[in-house]
Image (cartoon, rainbow, N blue to C red):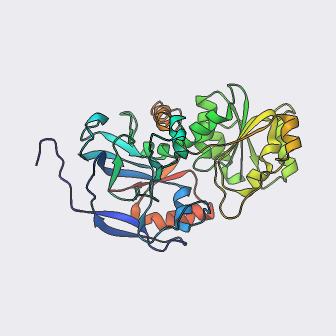
Amino acid sequence: MAKNEIPIPQKQKAVIYDHPGRISTKVVEIDVPEPGPGEILINLTHTGVCHSDLAIMMKTWKNLPYPTQPGQVGGHEGVGRIVRLGPSTESSGLKIGDRVGIKWVWSVCSNCPACFAGLDGICFNHKVSGYYTPGTFQQYALSPANYATPIPDGLSSADAAPMLCAGVTVFAALNRSKALPGQWVVISGVGGLGHIACQLASRGMGLRVIAIDHGSKEVLALESGAEHFVDFAKLDEDSITGHVKALTGGMGAHAAVVCTAANAAYAQALQLLRFNGTLVCVGIPEGDRVAIGGAAPGAMISKHLTITGSAVGNRFEAIRALEFAERGIIKAHYEVEKMEQLTDIFERMKQGTLRGRVVLDLS
């Protein structure tokens, strides 16, 4: 064994999607991969579970280029330590024992127009962890050395895992909202992304937050920094609009960030904005195409409204999100489970009974 090399088994435990198209996972034993040129091997200790993993397993996103195959290892929020460096990784500055993370975007080409603009999430040649590549629902995973995210020393691996998707996603989305300190932002959907968005907006960016979700999420929203909470189950669309306008001095919010995939959230979002407001689309609706209510040219022109999308974030935004987490400004509300519980976790996610996130202990 070479100096500083860590013993690595030949086999590992992983969770696969054994029947894509329905909620079903299976713990199996697979080979530990060998890193190729430019790659590192990470011994993962924790990984987050995201609604995107559910969509990939269920094959409900119509924009994916091919069906999810049986045997796919999902997951894209993995944290662990480097145990082997592949060839041609010297320039990365990484070393064995470093703690790093794997994100939704597993790799980018760094050479396309989107990459030049810092838009990693829409790189023309990007690969998605847990879909294009074996993901983080396994004990050992590969990552490009130049795209692994360093984990701050003051942040636990369990706390870091959700930040690699939910954290960076809402950080990028709030930046794209162009809302300034003291201005109003509506966070629609207080789930895995939304509760972190409430924290970051209120405590990290000085925004005034109105959260919208089912009444069961009210305590989580207010604990996460929302100034006001609107229960959509108690009000119709017009009443929600009127209530938000009343809370904001009759004007409406400066920005709205839709963190949920619910069609109803997109149907009402534009109505919540004041003049020059920005709607940021984050949650990806499943199934048929969804219309954004009120997006008629006349209304858009008369109020100078902006609709923009935000696909995760770039490498720098991921590092910034982790810095906010290390400082205690944002923290995911999560429970820790073993990988054997993944099917049950997805069932609860589908039913909408999860509060916050789930992090898998992969030991």
Q: Quadrant of residue 89?
A: top left
Q: Is residue 200 above or below residue 73?
A: above
Quadrant of the image for the C terminus? Answer: bottom left
Question: What is the x, y in percent for residue 301?
Answer: 85, 37
Q: Quadrant of residue 298?
A: top right
Question: What is the x, y in percent for residue 198?
Answer: 63, 39
Q: What count of labels does the image hold? A: 0
Question: Is any part of residue 224 visible from this angle?
Answer: no
Q: Residue at x 62, y 60 (%)?
A: 352
Between 328 and 93, the one nearer to me in the picture: 93
Question: What is the x, y in percent for residue 289?
Answer: 72, 60
Q: Which residue sits furthest bottom?
A: 19
Question: What is the x, y in percent for residue 277?
Answer: 77, 35
- Left of 282 or right of it: where is 361? left
Between 230 and 193, the one nearer to me in the picture: 193
Q: Which residue sits furthest top?
A: 181
Q: Residue at x 48, y 74 (%)?
A: 19
Question: Is any part of residue 120 visible from this angle?
Answer: yes
Between 209 and 167, the one nearer to me in the picture: 167
Q: Residue at x 33, y 54 (%)?
A: 141
- Left of 172 or right of it: where is 13? left
Q: Quadrant of residue 31?
A: bottom left
- Left of 68 or right of it: where is 206? right
